[in-house]
Protein backbone atom coordinates (compact mmCIF):
# COMPACT_ATOMS: atom_id res chain seq x y z
CA UNK A 1 0.00 0.00 0.00
CA UNK A 2 1.48 3.33 -1.05
CA UNK A 3 1.26 6.55 0.91
CA UNK A 4 -1.45 7.86 -1.44
CA UNK A 5 -3.69 4.90 -0.49
CA UNK A 6 -3.96 6.01 3.13
CA UNK A 7 -7.18 7.65 4.27
CA UNK A 8 -7.20 11.31 5.21
CA UNK A 9 -5.24 11.56 8.51
CA UNK A 10 -6.65 14.98 9.38
CA UNK A 11 -9.68 13.57 11.19
CA UNK A 12 -7.53 11.57 13.63
CA UNK A 13 -5.12 14.46 14.11
CA UNK A 14 -7.77 17.11 14.62
CA UNK A 15 -9.94 14.92 16.86
CA UNK A 16 -6.93 13.95 18.97
CA UNK A 17 -5.85 17.57 19.30
CA UNK A 18 -9.33 19.02 19.76
CA UNK A 19 -10.68 16.60 22.37
CA UNK A 20 -7.49 16.64 24.44
CA UNK A 21 -7.35 20.44 24.28
CA UNK A 22 -10.97 20.78 25.41
CA UNK A 23 -10.42 18.43 28.35
CA UNK A 24 -7.23 20.25 29.34
CA UNK A 25 -8.91 23.64 29.07
CA UNK A 26 -11.63 22.64 31.50
CA UNK A 27 -8.98 21.25 33.85
CA UNK A 28 -7.13 24.58 33.77
CA UNK A 29 -10.43 26.35 34.41
CA UNK A 30 -10.78 24.31 37.61
CA UNK A 31 -13.42 21.71 36.78
CA UNK A 32 -11.28 18.70 37.76
CA UNK A 33 -7.71 17.91 38.90
CA UNK A 34 -4.85 18.34 36.47
CA UNK A 35 -4.28 14.60 36.21
CA UNK A 36 -7.61 13.98 34.46
CA UNK A 37 -6.48 14.80 30.89
CA UNK A 38 -3.17 12.91 31.07
CA UNK A 39 -4.32 9.55 29.72
CA UNK A 40 -6.07 11.24 26.80
CA UNK A 41 -3.04 13.46 26.26
CA UNK A 42 -0.75 10.48 25.89
CA UNK A 43 -2.70 8.08 23.69
CA UNK A 44 -5.12 10.28 21.73
CA UNK A 45 -3.65 13.77 21.66
CA UNK A 46 -0.12 12.35 21.63
CA UNK A 47 0.42 8.98 19.97
CA UNK A 48 -2.60 9.05 17.65
CA UNK A 49 -2.01 12.64 16.54
CA UNK A 50 1.72 12.00 16.05
CA UNK A 51 0.87 8.99 13.87
CA UNK A 52 -1.57 11.08 11.82
CA UNK A 53 1.22 13.58 11.23
CA UNK A 54 3.56 10.84 10.06
CA UNK A 55 0.93 9.66 7.56
CA UNK A 56 0.44 13.22 6.28
CA UNK A 57 4.18 13.65 5.81
CA UNK A 58 4.27 10.36 3.90
CA UNK A 59 1.58 11.82 1.65
CA UNK A 60 3.79 14.86 1.01
CA UNK A 61 1.75 17.33 3.09
CA UNK A 62 4.37 19.31 5.03
CA UNK A 63 1.91 21.71 6.70
CA UNK A 64 -0.48 19.11 8.09
CA UNK A 65 2.27 16.60 8.85
CA UNK A 66 4.41 19.05 10.80
CA UNK A 67 1.40 20.36 12.73
CA UNK A 68 0.28 16.92 13.89
CA UNK A 69 3.77 15.59 14.62
CA UNK A 70 4.53 18.80 16.52
CA UNK A 71 1.43 18.89 18.69
CA UNK A 72 1.44 15.13 19.12
CA UNK A 73 4.94 15.56 20.55
CA UNK A 74 3.63 18.40 22.72
CA UNK A 75 1.03 16.19 24.38
CA UNK A 76 3.42 13.28 24.84
CA UNK A 77 5.97 15.64 26.39
CA UNK A 78 3.36 17.15 28.68
CA UNK A 79 2.38 13.66 29.80
CA UNK A 80 5.99 12.75 30.56
CA UNK A 81 6.74 15.81 32.68
CA UNK A 82 3.40 15.89 34.52
CA UNK A 83 2.51 14.41 37.88
CA UNK A 84 -0.60 12.18 37.78
CA UNK A 85 -2.02 13.73 40.97
CA UNK A 86 -1.26 17.41 40.44
CA UNK A 87 -1.02 17.46 36.66
CA UNK A 88 1.85 19.90 36.24
CA UNK A 89 5.44 20.18 37.53
CA UNK A 90 7.04 23.24 39.11
CA UNK A 91 6.63 26.73 37.70
CA UNK A 92 10.14 27.15 36.22
CA UNK A 93 9.90 23.87 34.31
CA UNK A 94 6.45 24.66 32.95
CA UNK A 95 7.34 28.20 31.93
CA UNK A 96 10.23 26.91 29.85
CA UNK A 97 7.99 24.28 28.27
CA UNK A 98 5.12 26.68 27.50
CA UNK A 99 7.52 29.32 26.16
CA UNK A 100 8.64 27.22 23.19
CA UNK A 101 5.18 26.41 21.87
CA UNK A 102 4.00 29.94 21.01
CA UNK A 103 7.06 30.13 18.74
CA UNK A 104 6.08 26.88 17.02
CA UNK A 105 2.43 27.96 16.79
CA UNK A 106 3.29 31.38 15.37
CA UNK A 107 4.86 29.78 12.28
CA UNK A 108 1.60 28.04 11.43
CA UNK A 109 -0.64 30.90 12.50
CA UNK A 110 0.85 33.22 9.87
CA UNK A 111 0.46 30.49 7.23
CA UNK A 112 -3.04 29.40 8.27
CA UNK A 113 -5.04 32.09 6.36
CA UNK A 114 -4.12 30.34 3.14
CA UNK A 115 -5.83 27.23 4.43
CA UNK A 116 -9.33 28.32 5.39
CA UNK A 117 -11.39 29.92 8.12
CA UNK A 118 -11.63 26.93 10.47
CA UNK A 119 -7.91 26.21 10.45
CA UNK A 120 -7.09 29.91 10.86
CA UNK A 121 -9.43 30.31 13.82
CA UNK A 122 -7.92 27.27 15.55
CA UNK A 123 -4.36 28.57 15.19
CA UNK A 124 -5.18 32.13 16.26
CA UNK A 125 -6.94 30.83 19.39
CA UNK A 126 -4.11 28.38 20.07
CA UNK A 127 -1.46 31.08 19.85
CA UNK A 128 -3.42 33.28 22.25
CA UNK A 129 -3.88 30.29 24.56
CA UNK A 130 -0.16 29.60 24.78
CA UNK A 131 0.57 33.26 25.54
CA UNK A 132 -2.06 33.21 28.30
CA UNK A 133 -0.56 30.00 29.71
CA UNK A 134 2.82 31.73 29.90
CA UNK A 135 1.24 34.58 31.86
CA UNK A 136 -0.59 32.21 34.22
CA UNK A 137 2.60 30.25 34.83
CA UNK A 138 4.41 33.48 35.67
CA UNK A 139 1.90 34.20 38.43
CA UNK A 140 -1.05 35.95 36.81
CA UNK A 141 -3.53 33.59 38.44
CA UNK A 142 -6.46 35.98 38.04
CA UNK A 143 -6.78 34.99 34.37
CA UNK A 144 -6.44 31.22 34.90
CA UNK A 145 -10.11 30.37 34.55
CA UNK A 146 -10.51 32.60 31.48
CA UNK A 147 -7.42 30.95 30.01
CA UNK A 148 -8.98 27.54 30.53
CA UNK A 149 -12.14 28.57 28.71
CA UNK A 150 -10.11 30.06 25.86
CA UNK A 151 -8.18 26.80 25.49
CA UNK A 152 -11.47 24.88 25.54
CA UNK A 153 -12.70 27.08 22.66
CA UNK A 154 -9.52 26.29 20.74
CA UNK A 155 -10.17 22.56 21.02
CA UNK A 156 -13.82 23.03 20.11
CA UNK A 157 -12.90 24.70 16.81
CA UNK A 158 -10.48 21.87 15.93
CA UNK A 159 -13.14 19.30 16.83
CA UNK A 160 -15.67 21.06 14.58
CA UNK A 161 -13.32 21.02 11.60
CA UNK A 162 -12.71 17.29 12.13
CA UNK A 163 -16.45 16.65 12.48
CA UNK A 164 -17.03 18.53 9.22
CA UNK A 165 -14.56 16.33 7.34
CA UNK A 166 -16.19 13.14 8.63
CA UNK A 167 -19.72 14.37 7.90
CA UNK A 168 -18.90 15.52 4.38
CA UNK A 169 -17.15 12.23 3.63
CA UNK A 170 -20.04 10.19 5.00
CA UNK A 171 -22.70 11.99 2.96
CA UNK A 172 -20.56 12.58 -0.14
CA UNK A 173 -21.18 16.33 -0.27
CA UNK A 174 -20.33 19.48 1.64
CA UNK A 175 -22.69 19.85 4.58
CA UNK A 176 -20.95 21.67 7.44
CA UNK A 177 -17.38 22.32 6.26
CA UNK A 178 -16.24 25.84 7.25
CA UNK A 179 -15.72 28.14 4.31
CA UNK A 180 -12.16 27.77 3.05
CA UNK A 181 -9.78 28.95 0.39
CA UNK A 182 -9.75 26.15 -2.17
CA UNK A 183 -6.65 27.44 -3.93
CA UNK A 184 -4.45 25.51 -1.51
CA UNK A 185 -4.56 22.30 0.47
CA UNK A 186 -3.25 22.29 4.04
CA UNK A 187 -5.60 19.53 5.07
CA UNK A 188 -5.61 18.19 1.59
CA UNK A 189 -7.99 15.58 0.16
CA UNK A 190 -10.75 16.89 2.41
CA UNK A 191 -13.73 16.28 0.17
CA UNK A 192 -15.07 13.17 -1.45
CA UNK A 193 -15.55 11.60 -4.85
CA UNK A 194 -16.47 8.04 -5.69
CA UNK A 195 -13.88 6.02 -7.60
CA UNK A 196 -14.47 2.33 -8.33
CA UNK A 197 -16.55 1.76 -5.18
CA UNK A 198 -14.15 3.43 -2.79
CA UNK A 199 -14.14 6.88 -1.29
CA UNK A 200 -11.36 9.20 -2.39
CA UNK A 201 -11.09 12.40 -0.37
CA UNK A 202 -9.85 15.39 -2.32
CA UNK A 203 -10.22 19.11 -2.84
CA UNK A 204 -13.09 20.26 -5.06
Image (tube, rainbow, N blue to C red):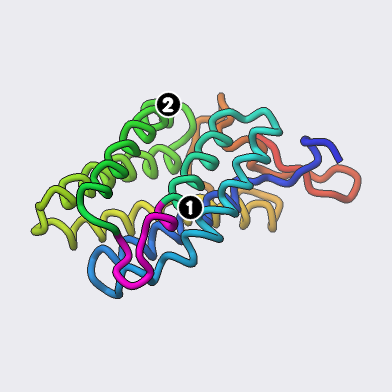
Residue hosting label 2:
111
Q: Could you say whether the residue bearing mark 2 is in a helix, strand or loop?
A: loop
Q: Decide: is 181 above or below 174.
A: above
Residue 183, how many percent across, how many down? 56, 24
Q: Real-space Cα distance between discs 1 and 2?
A: 25 Å
| Res. 201 image quadrant | top right
| Res. 155 image quadrant | bottom left
N-terminal of the pair, mark 1 or mark 2, is: 1
Residue 150, how many percent across, how many down? 26, 54
The front one of 33 and 14 is: 33
Residue 134, how many percent across, how many down? 21, 45
Q: In this view, does 106 lie to the left or right of 202?
A: left
**Magenta-highlighted residues:** 78-88
Q: Could you say whether the residue bearing mark 1 is in a helix, strand or loop?
A: helix
Counting the numbered discs, the total is 2
Q: Decide: is 51 above or below 116.
A: below
Please identify the quadrant where the N terminus is shown. Answer: top right
Q: Which residue is drawn at 23% across and 70% down?
A: 30
**Residue 85, magenta (yes or no):** yes
Residue hosting label 1:
76
Q: Residue at x 49, y 36 (%)?
A: 180
Q: Which is more foreground, mark 1 or mark 2? A: 1
Amino acid sequence: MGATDWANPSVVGLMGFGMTTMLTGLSIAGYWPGGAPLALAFIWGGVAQFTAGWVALKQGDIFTGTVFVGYGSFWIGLFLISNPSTGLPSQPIMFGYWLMWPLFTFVFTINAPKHGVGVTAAFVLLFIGFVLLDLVTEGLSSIQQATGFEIFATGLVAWYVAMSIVTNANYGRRICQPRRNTSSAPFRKMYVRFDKSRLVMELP
